[in-house]
Image (cartoon, rainbow, N blue to C red):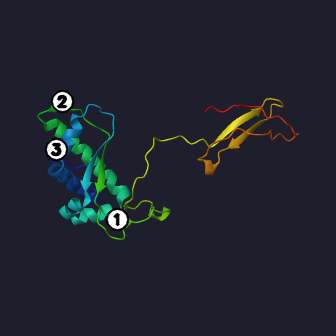
């Protein structure tokens, strides 16, 4: 596939784009063809790139990627999407393929140097930096929407009040046990006004 320059990139971004596009063509063509063969065009797909191989292929691009990942990773994603488009246009199985717009690069196997690896959870000072950290997934559950607060109304005095979730109980919002109305209502019956 021919490397094509994108008009909205500066010189170092264009260099990264071209190197990354060539790297993907050379090392990940089968993986990209597999992505194009999936039916769902709206799902998210990723190509896992071994960063050590990428860094061996071009040291300047690796330095750009490490020093400014917020700027360079989107360039890599853009290069991947262009590779997918070019492969789609040239491939012999084009009739079975669908072009994917939600394709992303995932870097794996970052070099083990102190600037890039952590043994603990990343800190706020690490925002915007390329990092690798290892750990063990001990439990996987589906995502749960956390309730922060619920609104209740006293059935006796009609006083409306909010009850916030308890951090120590995973933000569970318990039904109130007494009415907090300023006039001293003693009711214990409440209606939840918030949607669950």
Q: Residue furthest front?
A: 138
- The kind of secondary structure element at disc 2 is helix
- The kind of secondary structure element at disc 3 is helix
Which residue is labeled 1 in the image? 67
How crowded pointer 1 is (Cα within 10 Å; few <14, some 14-19, many 20+) is rated as some
Q: Position of residue 149 (x, y in %)?
A: 65, 41
Residue 9 in view here: no
Find out whether the residues at labels 1 and 3 contact each other: C-beta distance under 8 Å: no
Instruction: Tell me if 55 is positioned left or right of 42 in this view.
Output: left
Q: Residue furthest right?
A: 183
Of callouts 2 and 1, which one flags the residue occurring earlier in the amino acid sequence? 1
Which residue is drawn at the image coordinates 34% and 65% (left, top)? 67
Q: Position of residue 29 (x, y in %)?
A: 16, 46
157 in relation to 33, above or below: above
158 in relation to 124, above or below: above
Foreground pick, 77 / 118:
118
Numbered-mark total: 3
In which quarter of the view is residue 117 placed? bottom left
Of callouts 1 and 3, which one flags the residue occurring earlier in the amino acid sequence? 3
Which residue is drawn at the image coordinates 79% and 29% (left, top)? 155
Can you say which quadrant of the picture contains the C terminus? top right
Find out whether the residues at labels 2 and 3 contact each other: C-beta distance under 8 Å: no
Of tags 1 and 3, which is closer to the observer? Answer: 3
Which residue is labeled 2 in the image? 96
Instruction: Tell me if 179 is positioned left or right of 19 in this view.
Output: right
- The kind of secondary structure element at disc 1 is helix
Of tags 2 and 1, which is closer to the observer? Answer: 2
Separation of residues labelled 2 and 3 (CA atoms) = 15 Å
Q: Residue furthest bottom?
A: 114
Separation of residues labelled 1 and 3 (CA atoms) = 30 Å
**Marking on residue 30:** 3
């Amino acid at each position: 596939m021919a490397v094509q320059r994108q008009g909205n990139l500066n010189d170092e971004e264009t260099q990264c784009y071209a190197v990354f596009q060539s790297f993907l063509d050379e090392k990940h063509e089968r993986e990209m063809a597999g992505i194009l063969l999936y039916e769902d065009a709206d799902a998210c797909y990723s190509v896992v790139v071994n960063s050590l191989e990428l860094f061996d292929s071009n040291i300047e691009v690796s330095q750009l990627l490490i020093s400014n990942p917020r700027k360079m990773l989107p360039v890599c994603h853009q290069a991947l999407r262009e590779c997918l488009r070019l492969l789609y246009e040239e491939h012999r199985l084009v009739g079975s393929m669908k072009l994917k717009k939600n394709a992303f690069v995932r870097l794996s196997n970052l070099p083990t140097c102190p600037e890039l690896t952590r043994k603990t959870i990343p800190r706020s000072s690490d925002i915007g930096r390329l990092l690798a950290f290892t750990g063990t997934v001990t439990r996987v559950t589906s995502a749960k929407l956390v309730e922060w607060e619920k609104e209740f109304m006293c059935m006796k005095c009609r006083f409306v009040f909010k009850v916030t979730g308890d951090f120590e109980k995973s933000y569970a919002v318990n039904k109130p046990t007494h009415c907090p109305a300023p006039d001293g209502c003693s009711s214990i019956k409440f209606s939840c006004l918030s949607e669950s």
